[in-house]
Amino acid sequence: MTPGASGTELGDISPDSFRRLLHEVADWIADYRENINDRPISPTAQPGAIIQALPRFAPEIGEPVEEIWRDVQELIVPGMVHWGHPQFMGYFGSTSTGPGVLAEMICAALNVNAMTWRTSPAATELETVVLEWLREWLGLPPSFAGVVYDTASISTMHALAAAREEAAGTVRKAGLAGRQLPLFRIYTSDQAHSSVEKAAIALGLGEENVRRVASDAQFRLATEALRLMIRHDVEKGFRPLAVVATVGTTSTASVDPVLEIAALCRSHDMWLHIDAAYGGGLALLPEASWVKDGWNEADSLVINPHKMLFVPFDFSALFVKDIARLRDVFSLVPEYLRGDSVGADINYMDYGVQLGRRFRALKAWMVWRAFGREGMAARIREHMRLARLFASWLETDSRFELLAPVTMGVVCFGIKNDLLSSEETTRSLVEQLNSTGKTYLTRTKLHGRDAIRLGLGNILTNEGHLRTVWQMILGYVSRAAN
């Protein structure tokens, strides 16, 4: 055995050590989830502190795994932001569920590459199964089919790549450089996610050709402003390529008027992509069927089940009407894969830039079977109830005001007092609250106004946690006003 190594001559650990440590880690995970409420949410360390605490040079000789595991507990975990904490109310809910944790452990053990059916039949077919479940929950017609990626940024990039190929033709083969092609424009609201610009950068369309359309008083894309912008661009010689409509914007969870946008897309032969990464989960609620208006008119739609549907991060599903349009852009089978790519109904490597693909479908399958649609819907309703409750507290306190309608589990608010409503004060409030380790909020800007943003989506969060955060906010404002 190599001196200092913790396992065999090949560098792994012995079966007995592995089994013992596996049980120890499993107990630690169970304790972590059970007692996460007792942990500070945010670390107090300054930038660079963890780097300084870790060895500077890569190891030449293997170390006992017991020592590595001790460093994980003493150095790594204290430097984490605990997104699963019930009083973490920033960004979106990120709950680790029992079935999800178990699925991730199983995936790590199996360690398969789900690139073709032959390299992993169960992974491929399970992905097809969970995508079909999700398609039906979303109310998308059978003409849509899906593929799993990591995040909505990657899903949106793939959708816009298909749009570019249809509009320009042969870009896949000939590229963009040196060709007489029109200057394409992509349209999205001033509330939409920055992934639209990133997709334009990656696809060679150019960040400047993403046109941000003004939003209305409810932070939805203003269709008349879109109509005028398209007309102006056409007159200037630009080619409208696509509109990205948002269902659940990042700051306010607003929902764009998809039906109206779809009509504009049809009249100008544009691709309609719906970013429902956050808000798409609302479709599981029968009483929220309004959120699906116009979805069947889209060319593509992305939803992130790791946001509202309780699948561990990361899991993003892109649905495309006639998904062959996506395969036509990305299918590429080198000689060394030909034997493993024939004879299958679908090889998911053909639908994106990735060749190697994680077995993400297992965690969705296990979580959704354990919860059921009704179970997930009940939890989503509770998060919406808590959001409305928090909004009611704001509305009954003259020092605060709601800055956006509350449609999902997101509340944006400000402080009315002129002395406390500045960007500096808003930043200070959020920073001071977060520095306590007892909550985590974020801030944003809404039509030029500084806003504090509270997001709900953790299955561990209850009314008591919400009330604790509210009392912390009240305490800060009272102290700042004196």
Image (tube, grey):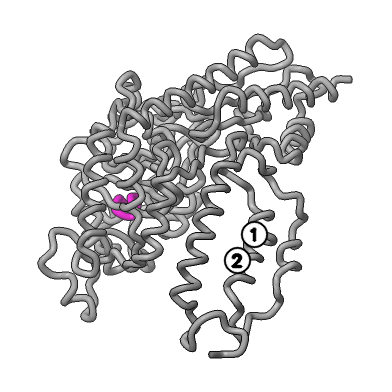
In the figure, is residue 365 to the left or right of 431? left
Residue 248 coordinates in the image, percent (x, y): 45, 32
Q: Secondary structure at mark 2?
A: helix
Which mark, by number, is residue 58?
A: none
Which of the image's four quarters has the C terminus?
A: top right
Q: Amino acid at mark 1?
A: Gln
Q: Is residue 247 left or right of residue 383?
A: left
Residue holding disc 1: 73
**Helix, strand, or loop for circle 1?**
helix
Instruction: Quickly name the residue at label 2.
Output: 69
Three-letter amino acid code of the residue under disc 2: Trp
Please provide percent x and percent y for residue 63: 61, 79
Residue at position x 55%, y 26% in the image: 462
Along the line of sight, the residue nearer the viewer: 446 or 81: 81
Who's the residue at 29% across and 63% down the image?
Answer: 171
Classify mark 2: residues with Cα within 10 Å, few (<14), some (14-19) or many (20+): some
What secondary structure predominates along the stretch shown in magenta? helix
